[in-house]
Image: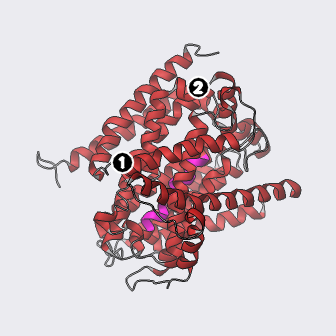
Amino acid sequence: MSLVDLFLGALLLLTGFLAVRLKNAVHAALALAANFILVGVVYFLLEARFLGWIQIIVYAGAIMVLFVFVIMLLYAARAEVGADPLPGLKPLAAAVGVVGFLALAYAFAGVKAPLAAKAASAALSGGTAEALGPVIWQTWLYAVLLVAALLLVATVAAVTILRPGEGGRR
Amino acid sequence: MIGALFVTAVKALVLILALLFAFAYITWIMRRGLARFQVRLGPNRVGPFGLLQPIADAVKAIFKEDITVAQADRLLYWLAPLLAFTFALAAFAVIPVGPDGWVVANLDMGVLYVFAASELAIYGVFLAGWASGSKYPLMGGLRSIAALVGYELALGMAILPVVLMAGTLNLQEIVEWQKQHGYFIVYQLPAFLIYFIASLAEMSRTPFDFAEAEQELVAGFHTEYSSTKFVAFYIAELLHWIVGSALIATLFLGGWDAPFGLPEIPVLWLFVKWALFIFLVLWIWASWFRTRYDQMIRFAWGVLLPAATVWFLITAYYVVKGGMA
């Protein structure tokens, strides 16, 4: 745990907090983008360099851009979201958050890292595309295919729901 | 460690100064060139052949009043030109201009770095569009994001065959590969064409310059900007053109490698190839129409992306089958 780790952790928490608490939707989206970039930096520090770049390109680049696009399209020039559409849900959300955190903490308490951090960095061999490729496309191929199928199903479902007419709700 | 850091810092400084100088004279070349295409003279009053025009323009722009519109979101309005300018400058850092040491940062995943920088640069554009609190900039910002979603995929898909054939994401190694085996424009002509069309959108140059579209949107996303903030956007815009041309020359035309067995001189050959693309883009600019942005998006998703995917699969099959071992 170095000073850099602490600093990054604090920044991650801060941007995450801002993303939830900021009233202005575009400001919140930007805080989330900063959060994504910081996660990328954490990946770099863990020697997972390819993953770090992908994190920045896919999340901070593509996904956040789509987010902001939707916000701009829906709220146009006024991004103040204003009244909470579902009042009274905040305590429930907080409770769910706490339960989720406890569950995660419990799950991680049982995990023993198979390698010490130093050895893990060496095993990642810089986290280049060459090191990552065989892991994704050989060892975990079926898991990757399952995730891909899941995303495809979600996309098809979204398109079906949003299609005008034909029983779909607009 | 400190020494290496110092060398990198000096290289970065030299690169930034060179890019800004290039920017200044790109404006001159652009205005004179467009004027030639349109049978006009262009700026020719300040200095010989109007060569001091960029300096006059800079002085004029800096002393203009810096206006912030009342509806603007202060923080983001101020941040947007900064982001656009910074990321536009940063992208050039991994492009090698000569063998070995002639690059600011020899990253092992340089291609990904360029992608990240060019994607983050779009933040400046749509933040400007949104933070101005005005209709035309908002339209420009929305258009620029819609375009990004369209062309960025085709752009990435068109780079993949090159990466696959060279077997590396490092731009320096891609150039070395081309030095040995010949330029990618020969092996990868379809990828080159797709990449070139998509990068016209990335530079927001003529068939796809609808983010500004002066006849429709006044000046698009930077309508409400003036003085130095406007200059920052103007520089960022033209830097995309400069960096994009250098990148395409590096990926497909062998970068700094001397063609036809001519003597190897760092910087010179990349400059020549770069100038070629700068002129090509100017030529298209002067002689072609602007597409409507929904046409461009249909074209990107319906033609560019499928074509790039098919070509990628063909290349992948070729490489797996032994390719050019």
Q: A97 or B33, which lies in front?
A: B33
Of the residues shown, which amino acid type is indicated by label 1?
Ser
Q: Nearer the viewer, mark 1 or mark 2?
A: 1
Image quadrant for the N terminus of chain B? bottom right
Label of residue B287 in the image: 1
> Residue A81 vs residue B159: left or right?
left
Q: Residues within 10 Å of mark 2 (few under 14, many from 20)?
A: many
At 55% from the left and 17% from the top, the residue drawn is B320
Q: B118 or A56, which lies in front?
A: B118
Q: Secondary structure at mark 1?
A: helix
Of the residues shown, which amino acid type is indicated by label 2?
Met
Q: B321 or A90, which lies in front?
A: B321
At 62% from the left and 42% from the top, the residue drawn is B272
User: What is the CA distance from the residue labelled 1 to the residue labelled 2?
Assistant: 35 Å
Residue B213 on image: x %, y %: 34, 61
Q: Badge 2 sits on which subunit?
A: B
Q: Is residue A60 visible?
A: no
User: Does the stretch in magenta take in B120?
Assistant: yes
Q: Badge 1 sits on which subunit?
A: B
